[in-house]
Image (cartoon, rainbow, N blue to C red):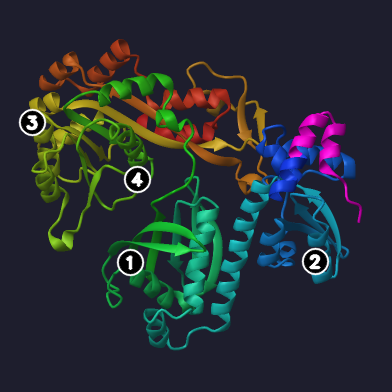
């Protein structure tokens, strides 16, 4: 083994001076920290520069774990404890040679431990520590989930009642391990939902990632009742009830990760189907400072939030990010000297300084009764998680008229359809006109994977989606980073309408919705969801395929 001083290598490459190296070495001697870590902390070099210098010196390759193919069987060669200890992960194997990605090529003892454990020749490549740690979380959670599923399949639970008793007692049964592994893997890969679906001969498990349901695992049909029972116990649902839908939620901790999930159970032909939704998603929001909005829509939304009273509605289908946008707004509003209260089903994210109340129909706490109670709490701002019925709509409107700022969500296809929906719910036009101050419609479209993005000449059908037919559009070819889908992550598109004095007059006089849109376009610079998405497609952010999903709703 040859000890290569990292400081000297960096000085040789011109990244640091001799004086800077001396200062770093002094800190190294006092603290015991690695010289490379000290230099990064001092802000003299980046981790990438260290990797680049060492790769050139030792003739090693730098890999991106986001894009390079990873052989799960190679990953299995190294135990998780060893992978964590040395920040190393195996990515491929062939002819008794194991390729291991590591963050520091000078971890000679770690490489030797891996060689002795596997009995294979170890070839090393380099990657940044955060990449390796994330890859370890993703791939080892998948291995654990598949191992748990195999353990259940090997012991097919002949006595379901006994299995359920064991689960109720909290034993570490294969089913408990399987669910924990599924939850952890779903969290690590950024899934929004887990679907557990009973089929005729097997149980199918799928993950919703970036809005698309992707197949993940098929397990033995015999485990399904016990798996559902475990979920029901966690969610405080009735285990014996199998004929009626049930909803609930639970919090759990898996490998130090706190998770908050909403549960939906419905009966189906072959058993109960379960959908678990992550409520505390850690997925980053693009342009989070602006709630994911472009500058024009953000400024309009900000002016709405300055109103001392009135209602702001966020609209869109389930899973369009409405509640996330509301939470961003609340996090900004809570900085003001105001009393903010919410009524939600369920509370998806806790916000310091906000009084949050959860709907509980069994105890008689519904949206309308909870809203009445909140009005006696001297609120300045109220957030109603969802306007589901005429009673809630009526109380919200009257709250806005009596001096409160109300934020709520509604299921409509576009912004101004909210006016029609409220009237259908029995709210008089003059009340709608005098209470609503702003309308925001929101959708999520998938982003093109940056690793496999390519330009192409669109077909006539795709060109027809645009006002001015483009000569070039973009798509993802598919790569390991995006699981061959061509997409990675999502971005929100919005339509934002401010209800000003003239629009109030038009609503009161029951003018057609087309007239309202024409006014918003002429006087407010309004652009609809399709137009916003067209701009993103032309910029290469999303695809024409995603655009067609919006035209179905808005055209």
**How far is the residue under mark 4 from the one under mark 3?**
30 Å
Name the spot of residue 373 as percent of width and height, x first: 10, 47
**How far is the residue under mark 2 from the one under mark 4?**
50 Å
Q: Mark 1: few, some, or many residues within 10 Å (few <14, many ≥20)?
A: some
Q: Is residue 340 above or below residue 110?
A: above
Q: Which residue is mark 1?
A: 235
User: Quick one: SS at disc 1?
Assistant: loop
Q: Mark 2: few, some, or many residues within 10 Å (few <14, many ≥20)?
A: some
In the depicted view, which residue is nearer to us: 549 or 184?
Answer: 184
Which quadrant of the view contains residue 378?
top left
Which callout, 2 or 4, points at the residue further toward the start of the chain?
2
Which callout, 4 or 1, points at the residue further toward the start of the chain?
1
User: Quick one: SS at disc 2?
Assistant: helix
> Which numbered tag is attached to residue 113?
2
Q: Which residue is mark 4?
A: 318
At horizontal 30% and vertical 32% (from top left) the residue drawn is 335
Task: Please name which of the two marks, 3 or 2, marks the residue nearer to the observer.
Answer: 2
> The C terminus lies in which quarter of the figure?
top left
Extent of the magenta region: 1-24
At horizontal 15% and vertical 53% (from top left) the residue drawn is 366
Q: Mark 3: few, some, or many residues within 10 Å (few <14, many ≥20)?
A: few
Q: Is residue 306 left or right of residue 230?
A: left
The answer to whether the residue labelled 3 contacts the one labelled 2, judged by CB atoms less than 8 Å apart, is no
């Amino acid at each position: 083994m040859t000890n290569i001083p990292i400081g000297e290598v960096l000085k040789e490459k011109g990244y640091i001076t001799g004086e800077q190296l001396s200062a770093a070495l002094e800190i190294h001697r006092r603290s015991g920290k690695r010289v490379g870590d000290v230099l990064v902390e001092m802000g003299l070099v980046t981790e990438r520069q260290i990797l680049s210098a060492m790769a050139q010196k030792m003739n090693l390759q730098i890999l991106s774990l986001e894009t390079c193919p990873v052989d799960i069987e190679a990953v299995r060669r190294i135990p998780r404890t060893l992978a964590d200890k040395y920040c190393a992960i195996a990515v491929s194997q062939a002819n008794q040679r194991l390729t291991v990605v590591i963050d520091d090529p000078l971890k000679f003892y770690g490489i030797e431990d891996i060689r002795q454990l596997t009995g294979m020749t170890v070839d090393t490549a380099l990657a940044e520590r955060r990449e390796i740690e994330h890859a370890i979380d993703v791939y080892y959670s998948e291995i654990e989930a598949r191992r748990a599923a195999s353990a259940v399949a090997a012991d097919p639970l002949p006595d379901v009642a006994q299995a359920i008793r064991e689960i109720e007692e909290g034993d570490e049964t294969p089913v408990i391990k399987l669910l924990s592994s599924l939850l952890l893997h779903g969290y690590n890969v950024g899934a929004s939902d887990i679907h557990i679906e009973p089929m005729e001969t097997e149980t199918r498990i799928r993950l919703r990632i970036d809005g698309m349901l992707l197949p993940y695992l098929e397990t033995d049909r015999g485990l399904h009742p016990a798996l559902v029972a475990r979920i029901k116990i966690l969610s405080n649902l009735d285990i014996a009830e199998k004929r009626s839908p049930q909803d609930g939620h639970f919090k759990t901790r898996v490998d130090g990760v706190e998770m908050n999930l909403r549960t939906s159970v419905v009966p189906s032909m072959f058993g109960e189907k379960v959908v678990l939704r992550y409520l505390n998603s850690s997925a980053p929001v693009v342009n989070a400072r602006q709630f994911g909005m472009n500058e024009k829509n953000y400024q309009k939304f900000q002016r709405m939030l300055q109103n001392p009273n009135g209602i702001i509605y966020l609209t869109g289908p389930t899973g369009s990010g409405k509640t996330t946008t509301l939470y961003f707004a609340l996090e900004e509003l809570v900085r003001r000297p105001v009393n903010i209260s919410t009524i939600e089903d369920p509370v998806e994210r806790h916000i310091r300084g906000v009084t949050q109340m959860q709907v509980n129909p069994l105890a008689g706490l519904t949206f309308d009764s909870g809203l009445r109670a909140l009005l006696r709490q001297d609120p300045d701002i109220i957030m109603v998680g969802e306007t589901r019925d005429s009673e809630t709509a009526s109380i919200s409107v009257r709250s806005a008229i009596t001096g409160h700022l109300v934020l709520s969500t509604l299921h409509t296809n576009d912004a101004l359809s909210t006016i029609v929906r409220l009237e259908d719910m029995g709210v008089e036009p003059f009340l709608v006109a005098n209470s609503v101050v702003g309308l925001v419609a929101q959708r999520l479209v998938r982003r093109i994977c940056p690793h496999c993005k390519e330009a192409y000449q669109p077909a006539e059908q795709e060109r027809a989606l645009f006002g001015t037919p483009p000569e070039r559009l973009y798509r993802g070819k598919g790569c390991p980073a995006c699981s061959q889908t061509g997409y990675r992550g999502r971005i929100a598109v919005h339509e934002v309408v401010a209800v000003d004095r003239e629009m109030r007059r038009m609503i009161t006089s029951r003018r057609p919705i087309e007239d309202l849109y024409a006014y918003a376009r002429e006087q407010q610079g309004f652009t609809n969801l399709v137009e916003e998405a067209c701009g993103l497609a032309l910029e290469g952010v999303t695809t024409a395929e995603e655009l067609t999903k919006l035209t179905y709703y808005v055209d």
